[in-house]
Image (spheres, helix red, strand yellow):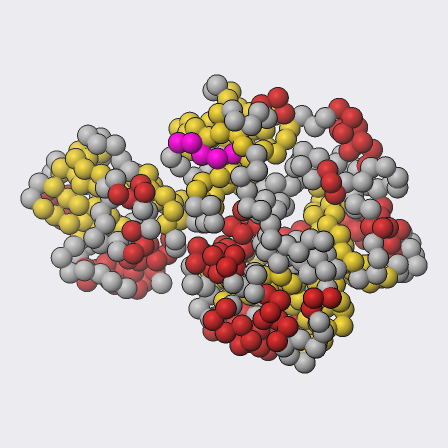
């Protein structure tokens, strides 16, 4: 299971990369592996205001429909449109292919996220 | 309650199957990945464990006559070693199950039914059985393997003692030895490809599984239930619980071809005769997505904001590489080319009623 050291993680198997006031958000290797072949991604609309815990995107595999939650509040400033035509990129490289970029309201919310070590332990429990 | 295991459970683990609870059975949803497995079957061959399917035998001098009374199709026209697809209906025309009827002889009939319906089916058959027929549930004795795909015959032939070319589509041979093991082999399947279904004694199943994979080498792979579903869906083969149900008749599901209303009596005939005269109020239609999204089973279908039915099965079809579906809708809205709305997570997404967009089967029909 690939868990990059430079990212933060959620218990819903999203990853977060912090870049100043913005965070990149995607799904983890664990998530894509358990979903199986991903065939559709419903992206958030630009300028959507999200509250932490909101479902901001939907990832569908052949068998499953799964929500992607934002662990932070803020505004969607970018969505990765490449995923609309090539949803399989989330299987191939889940960490290079983010789903959205969010301008965060309150950086303190990042403190609730898991470190790579904590996430690794969390995944081990779920297996 | 612990999950039931098929005789091939250890093989699924050995070959990396991802095991799920499938109606109380521990079965693999996938091995290498659903889409990869799907293409493997369309292009080469796949090996499926379908041991969870139920086998029921009906024996006695009136076995054939009783089977005719039980199902919608004319089993009386079957020759020995021939198979027919049929439905077992309730008196109101709703479906108890869909099944394959194997005729060994007039006094020996073998039914293959859906796993999830086995107990219900067996009880139903016993309840209606003529006094002089013997009904037996043989499901635990048999394992069932399916070998499907354009390479299926070539691979199986390598290890069979019988010319498999002599088994035509929807016929079977009850005395084939594969890898030295006695099997019942039929040219049937649930994928839209040529192929075989093999019934074998449960204790020999794992050995046979290995021998078939060995004979196929790189041209065969184990296939899970996920691809089994996408393959059957693309070929527009119905699934009980989705296209068929106790509240859906075979005529509504577009299976009138398998309902013979002319001669003999059978359970549900009266209701189906009436429905045919009146035209069913609902009809199963093909549709393709126009807007973005994947239709899923039970999503609602609307026209101009009013509900007209629901999606029975929908999916991203791997062969066509697009999202298509089947929906049961009110008859008056069955207008190919017309747009409808599929309600996906509360939002109306555009789709178009179509005809002939599903996969053309490659089965060896004569």
On the rendered image, what quadrant is the N terminus of chain B found in? bottom right
Q: Is residue B280 visible?
A: yes
Residue B121 visible from this viewpoint: no
Up/down of B264 relative to B270, above or below: below
Towards the viewer: B39 or B13: B39
Q: Residue at x 29, y 56 (%)?
A: A92
The residue at the point 59 percent across, 65 percent down is B152
Q: Is residue A35 left or right of residue B240?
A: left
Is residue A63 magenta-colored?
no
Q: Residue furthest bottom?
A: B180
Question: Who's the residue at 25% across and 40% down the image?
Answer: A81
Of B24 and A102, nearer the camera is A102
Q: From the top left corner, tell me how far across and down residue B184 is, in percent.
A: 72, 68
Magenta-highlighted stretch: main secondary structure? strand
Instruction: Say which quarter of the image contains residue B215.
Output: bottom right
Q: Is residue A104 left or right of residue B253?
A: left
Q: Position of residue B74 (x, y in %)?
A: 82, 46
Residue B317 higher or lower than B5, as above or below: above
Find the magenta span and give its range.
Answer: B287-291
Q: Is residue A17 left or right of residue B279?
A: left
**Is B290 colored magenta in this rendering?**
yes
Query: Where residue A1 appears, x then y in whole percent?
Result: 28, 64
| Residue B177 locus on image (x, y percent) | 70, 76
């Amino acid at each position: 299971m690939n868990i990059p050291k430079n990212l933060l993680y959620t218990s819903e198997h999203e990853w977060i990369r912090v870049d100043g006031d913005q965070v990149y958000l995607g799904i983890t290797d664990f998530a894509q592996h358990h979903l199986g072949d991903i065939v559709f991604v419903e992206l958030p609309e630009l300028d959507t205001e999200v509250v932490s815990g909101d479902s901001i995107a939907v990832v569908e595999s052949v068998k499953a429909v799964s929500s992607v939650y934002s662990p932070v509040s803020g505004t969607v400033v970018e969505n990765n449109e490449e995923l609309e035509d090539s949803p399989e990129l989330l299987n191939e490289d889940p960490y290079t292919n983010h789903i959205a970029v969010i301008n965060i309201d309150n950086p303190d919310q990042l403190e609730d996220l898991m470190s790579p070590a904590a996430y690794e332990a969390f995944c081990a429990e779920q297996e | 309650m612990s999950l039931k295991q098929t005789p091939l459970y250890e093989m699924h683990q050995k070959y990396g199957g991802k095991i799920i609870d499938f109606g109380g059975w521990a079965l693999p949803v996938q091995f290498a990945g659903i889409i990869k497995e799907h293409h493997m079957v369309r292009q080469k061959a796949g090996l499926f464990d379908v041991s969870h399917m139920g086998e029921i035998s009906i024996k006695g001098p009136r076995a054939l006559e009783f089977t005719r009374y039980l199902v919608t199709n004319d089993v009386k026209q079957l020759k020995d070693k021939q198979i027919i697809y049929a439905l077992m209906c309730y008196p109101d025309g709703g479906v108890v199950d869909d099944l394959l009827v194997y005729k060994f002889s007039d006094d020996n009939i073998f039914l293959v039914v859906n796993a999830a319906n086995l107990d219900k089916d067996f009880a139903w058959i016993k309840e209606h059985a003529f006094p002089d027929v013997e009904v037996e549930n043989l499901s635990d004795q048999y394992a069932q393997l399916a070998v499907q795909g354009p390479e299926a015959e070539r691979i199986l032939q390598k290890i069979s003692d019988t010319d498999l070319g002599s088994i035509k589509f929807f016929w079977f041979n009850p005395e084939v030895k594969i890898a030295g093991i006695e099997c019942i082999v039929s040219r049937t399947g649930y994928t839209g490809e040529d192929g075989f279904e093999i019934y074998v004694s449960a204790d020999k199943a794992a050995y046979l599984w290995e021998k078939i994979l060995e004979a196929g080498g790189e041209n065969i792979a184990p296939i899970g239930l996920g691809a089994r579903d996408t393959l059957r869906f693309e070929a527009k083969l119905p699934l009980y619980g989705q296209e068929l149900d106790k509240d859906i008749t075979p005529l509504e599901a577009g299976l009138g071809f398998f309902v013979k209303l002319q001669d003999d009596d059978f359970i549900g005939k009266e209701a189906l005769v009436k429905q045919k005269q009146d035209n069913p109020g609902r009809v199963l239609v093909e549709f393709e997505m126009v807007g973005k999204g994947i239709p899923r089973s039970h999503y609602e279908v609307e026209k101009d904001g009013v509900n007209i039915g629901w999606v029975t099965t929908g999916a991203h079809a791997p062969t066509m590489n697009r999202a298509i579906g089947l929906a049961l809708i009110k008859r008056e809205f069955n207008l190919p080319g017309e747009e409808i709305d599929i309600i996906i997570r509360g939002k109306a997404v555009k789709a178009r009623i179509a005809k002939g967009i599903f996969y053309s089967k490659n089965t060896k029909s004569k």
